[in-house]
Amino acid sequence: MLLLTAFPALLVGLILLGLILKSRAILALKPLSEVLFGTSWHPLKGNFGLLPYLAGTAWVTLAAMVLAVPVSLLTAVYLSEYAPRFVRATVRPVIDLLAGIPSVVFGVWGVLLIVPFVGRVLAPLFKVYSSGYSILAGAIVLAIMIFPTIILVCLEVFAAIPRELRDASLALGATRWETIRHVVLRKGAQGIIAAVVLGFSRAFGETMAVLMVVGNVARIPHSLFDSAYPLPALIANNYGEMLSIPLYDSAIMLAALVLLLVVLVFNLGARIILTRIQRRVQ
Amino acid sequence: MSRYRRRRLVERVFLALMILSTFIVVGSLLLILGTIVVKALPALNLDMITKTPKGGFYLGKEGGILNAIVGSLYLGLGATLLAIILSLPIVLYIDSYSRRGSPLAGYVRFALDVLWGIPSIVYGAFGFIIMTFIGLRASLLAGIITVALLELPIMARAMDEVVQLVPPALKEASAALGATRLETAVKVVLRQCMPGFLTAVLIAFGRGVGDAASVLFTAGFTDRIPTSLLQPAATLPLAIFFQLGTPFPEVRERAFASAAILTLLILVISLAARWLSRKLGKHTLQ
């Protein structure tokens, strides 16, 4: 049992180790900076520049965060501070269901509704041309996918703030919103940051849904209506051919390693903050 | 405007924004379910769930996605079983054996949380590395191993939440009767936590069945129903993905129907989880 108990920690290390070993082949031949910041991706010519993919991931993820953070935060505040009991009891299961919907279904929905919406409604509105398969479509789908993550963590954070602090503020004559702004949001600031970071890292690694709506064009994007090619999509789309071209599999594994490292760093940070908050509560 | 009225206005505006946000969140779920159902109806028929793809299925001809439905269930069941075998001992151990205040439980929970955050495509890539390492080809077994690793943190963390709610007095009573730690863990804690554990298992199962990125490298895809662990297996998410990728409208419509089937499956699983935890929860000691 003790052995099995060590397994989770061991697994994190094993995944890291496996990816590092596999990506050593390409790092032995090319400096890391050339792979990370190279703009040309031509596996047949031996060019493996990840920059367009990194840029694609960054655009989609950041745009999704801009959409998701305010909505999730306001919803979490409403549910924890304002909502009557029956609203809370209805909305909570909805959020759980939303969290359980498979990413492929989000992708299908994006293709059905969001892509045409962006291509035929939003793009003409801004007087640009877009097929709809764009960063914006990816960001909208991603934002909805990470609502549950941010909301649920925020709810836990708000629940950990002592009732007396709110009462004291209300007793001083503050309105409810003023109490939220000066007491709840300030006291919960660290936890909110952690929630946002967790949402960010979920969005960063999300593969299938984004892959289906973002267009997959390997160029550095310049606007929200451009197509992009995020890093996870690169990994998912190329597994078939990667064994037949030298260094290709190593480059793909390096892409996975970069993805893992970014997600790990953000996750570790957020979890450390949350653990500290929990300990303070107890 | 008086100061008082301004403060009330701000209050109103923010309350309106909050309610709007909540509507957006709830509305997106309804919109997703509604769109999928409406678009799926034209292609939804009994053939979809009772037949495997016939020749020319991906050109819009006869057949269904029984191969993917069965494949997904095999994969989900296998992976969930393996994940239970991995997580039960972990959860019981950190609860019953680690000394109170020892940092071990904290470390394990932390590791599980970190595992939870790892994207499924990375699990897929890792599964692929294991496969090449032990010489396994894309198969049901490889898929099961990969998805089990993906499910492990979800299941173990959910079980851990349940175990933490067991009243310490119950364990003390068991120990006072002379039970060993193992007996207490298996006969008292496990039994008390059964409903919660079932919910945890169902949540993990739903996640495993719905995940596409991790099986893309590892489980392969085939039109036949696998008869051994070493054969490749089709999965619902990938069937949806591949059908949507074709240029034929009939096949794309089937992708929508498949998406509706997968969504229904997931909804049933998560509603069952809810119902079970409420129904069985009555018999546990408070």
Image: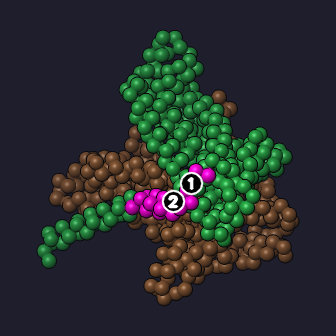
The answer to whether residue A233 is visible is: no
Q: Residue B3 vs residue A162: left or right?
A: left
Q: Chain B's shade in the image?
A: green
- Residue, disc 2: B41
The answer to whether residue B93 is visible is: yes
Q: Which chain is displayed in brown in the rendered image?
A: A
Q: Which residue is found at the position 58% from the left and 82% from the top?
A: A222
Q: Which residue is found at the position 66% from the left and 76% from the top?
A: A217
- Badge 2 crowding class, 10 Å Cα cut-off, few under 14, some 14 to 19, many 20 or more, is some
| Residue closer to the observer: B34 or B172 | B34
State the quadrant of the C terminus of chain A: top left
Which three-letter amino acid code belongs to the residue tagged 2? Leu
- The answer to if A258 sits in the magenta stretch is no
**Element type at mark 1:** loop
Q: Residue B280 vs residue B187: left or right?
A: left
Toward which corner of the image does residue A37 lie, by quadrant?
A: bottom right
Subunit that carries the residue with mark 2: B
- Badge 1 crowding class, 10 Å Cα cut-off, few under 14, some 14 to 19, many 20 or more, is few
Point out the stretch of residues depicted in magenta.
B27-47
Subunit that carries the residue with mark 1: B
**Element type at mark 2:** helix
* A218 lies above or below B20: below
The residue positioned farthest toward the top in the image shown: B177
- Residue, disc 1: B45
- Rendered image coloring scheme: by chain
State the quadrant of the N terminus of chain A: top right
Q: Residue B52 vs residue B260: left or right?
A: right
